[in-house]
């Protein structure tokens, strides 16, 4: 019997509302649960737990983490998100681009400095069946 459903990492953020705006308005997540200083966000099979870091905390936005979300079609996701991604500062979005390690990735820098990566395996084109 399978026990594991998903991983929902904590992201320590300096400004919870700013992080929620980014994840909901730019990346299309929903907020099924929220309380002061904490929120759970979700989209399809991916969830994050956002915890507002206290001022001066070393937990907030040091680019120590890159959160990798495996997707079925990174180009389709990019097309969906592009109008909102275009509102982000220059340099905060990279891709989609093929990487030498066999992944096609879209990188998005969150307002707190953490890196959110959406990626998929690059598969050789299927040989047309006769």
Image: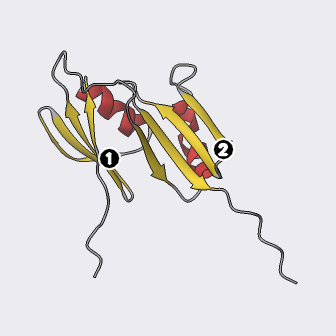
Residue sitting nearer the eye, 77 or 1: 1
> Percent position (x, y) of residue 119?
55, 49
The N terminus: image quadrant: bottom left
State yes or no: discs 1 and 2 in contact (Cβ < 8 Å): no
Q: Residue furthest top?
A: 56
Q: Nearer the viewer, mark 1 or mark 2?
A: 2
On the image, numbered disc 2 is attached to which residue?
99
Residue sitting nearer the eye, 66 or 21: 66
Q: CA distance from mark 1 to mark 2?
A: 30 Å
Tell me which numbered mark, 1 or 2, is placed earlier along the sequence. Answer: 1
Which corner quadrant of the image does residue 59 belong to? top left
Q: Residue at horizontal 30%, vertical 34%?
A: 20
Q: Is residue 99 above or below residue 51?
A: below
Q: Residue at horizontal 25%, vertical 23%?
A: 14
Q: Secondary structure at mark 2?
A: loop
Q: Residue at horizontal 45%, vertical 38%?
A: 116
> Percent position (x, y) of residue 95?
63, 37
On the image, numbered disc 1 is attached to which residue?
30
Which corner quadrant of the image does residue 26 belong to? top left
Q: Residue furthest right?
A: 130
Task: For label 2, count other residues whose C-alpha is less than 10 Å away and answer few (under 14), some (14-19) or many (20+).
Answer: few
The C terminus: image quadrant: bottom right
Q: What is the total number of numbered labels drawn onto the structure image?
A: 2
Q: Secondary structure at mark 1?
A: strand
């Amino acid at each position: 019997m399978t026990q594991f459903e998903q991983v929902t990492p904590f992201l320590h953020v300096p400004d919870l509302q700013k992080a929620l705006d980014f994840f909901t308005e730019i990346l299309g997540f929903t907020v099924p649960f929220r309380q002061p200083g904490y929120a759970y966000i979700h989209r399809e099979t991916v969830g994050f737990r956002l915890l507002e870091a206290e001022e001066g905390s070393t937990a907030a936005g040091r680019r120590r983490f890159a959160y990798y979300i495996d997707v079925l079609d990174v180009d389709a996701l990019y097309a969906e998100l592009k109008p909102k991604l275009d509102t982000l500062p220059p340099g905060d979005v990279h891709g989609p681009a093929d990487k030498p390690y066999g992944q096609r990735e879209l990188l998005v820098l969150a307002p707190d400095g953490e890196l959110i990566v959406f990626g998929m395996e690059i598969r050789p084109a299927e040989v047309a069946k006769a």
